[in-house]
Image (tube, rainbow, N blue to C red):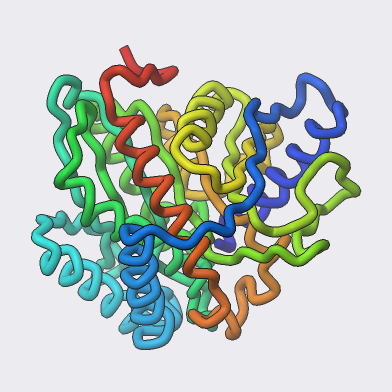
Amino acid sequence: MYFARVAIQLLAVSAALAGQGMLQGCVHRSPGTLHPPSDDPLTQAQVQLRDEMTRDVRTLSAQIGPRNAAYTPQNILAAEQWLLEALSVSGLDARRIEVKMGNGSVANIEVSFPGNKNADEILVIGAHYDTVFDSPGANDNASGVSMLLAAARRLGDAKIDRTVRIVFFVNEEYPFSWGIQMGSKVYARHCRENGDNIVAMIAVDSVGYFSNKPGSQKYPIFALNLPKKANFIAFGSNLENAPLLDRVVSVFQNETALPSIGAASDSKHASRGDHAAFWWSGYPGIMMSDTSEFRDPHYHSSTDRAENLNYDEMARLADGFIATIIELAGAETELPNSR
């Protein structure tokens, strides 16, 4: 999450300032209720989600390891092949979208679920599968990849009106951030050239570190009226995309009691992450994250390993997020950019 790091900082600052009523007009905090965390046992469906995501995170982070096209090209290709096989085993047809790399190539991986009534309106749910050069990347971002795999395995049985694309992006991390080989940037540009009508994009990045210890959640400034425990999920965007942000947060909070907050800002630093690549091509986008370095001491390090993640909370999050995707894909759910 090298590229998204300042976006997470901005999200935390924006939420803090909005929560304190400061810098009005410069920041926005989504309305809604910060639910208390649940101590209810996992449902049977959530247990299955937990087991799937545990397995997938361990495969990517422990068996394949650091995944960077510049430093460990053999591992990024192994991760690509593993994704294609994992999707195929689940009965899903995946498309390999090439990203040129000198004399070779790496790839974004896409699985599409056509809608029924409004198939021309497209939701893109994305997560990058690469890492910084020396990190196993369990939280950043095998956690996000595992959540998208879980969603892909379930969307085939869902009744959706809008088309949903699950996309695994390559080259989000340094040294590709912002460059012409950044996977999400290549993908969004191709979508614009093809005239694709993307009405919402959600980037899922680092979603596995949770703690109920007091003081486990940090902020870059002193923050009142914000959670002091790292037990919530955060959504973020720029101000232009605040209506989409609010809609997603509202739907998410209706689908799950897992604590969540949303915040937006017009700072130039908001344009960091795979969601921003869609802004550059004229599409709406937001991000979802656990705030990474503001709670996760293993951020961008060799200790970002599978055993540090909270798979029960990931299962609750995935359960609610998949339900949110399905709701957003329904024709009756109005989106700011839909017709």
Left or right, 3 with reference to 180: right
Res 70 → quadrant: bottom left
Left or right, 46 with reference to 3: left
| Vertical order, 226 against 83 (above or below) | above
Residue closest to the eye, 202 or 214 = 214
Residue closest to the eye, 303 or 231 = 231
| Vertical order, 192 against 77 (above or below) | above
Residue 99 visible? The answer is no
Residue 1 at x, y = what percent? 55, 62
| Vertical order, 141 against 196 (above or below) | below
Left or right, 121 with reference to 328: left
Which residue corresponds to the image point at 28% horizontal and 57% vertical from the top-left? 108
The outermost residue toward the top is 339
Which residue corresponds to the image point at 60% horizontal and 39% vertical from the top-left? 236
Which residue corresponds to the image point at 44% horizontal and 18% vertical from the top-left? 336
Residue 130 visible? The answer is yes
Residue 254 at x, y = what percent? 48, 32
Residue closest to the eye, 73 or 11 = 11
Residue closest to the eye, 48 or 333 = 48
Res 47 → quadrant: bottom left
Which residue corresponds to the image point at 21% horizontal and 32% vertical from the top-left? 160
The outermost residue toward the bottom is 63
Left or right, 219 with reference to 320: right
Residue 31 at x, y = what percent? 65, 26
Q: Quadrant of the C terminus?
A: top left
Residue 80 at x, y = what percent? 26, 70
The outermost residue toward the right is 222
The outermost residue toward the front is 40
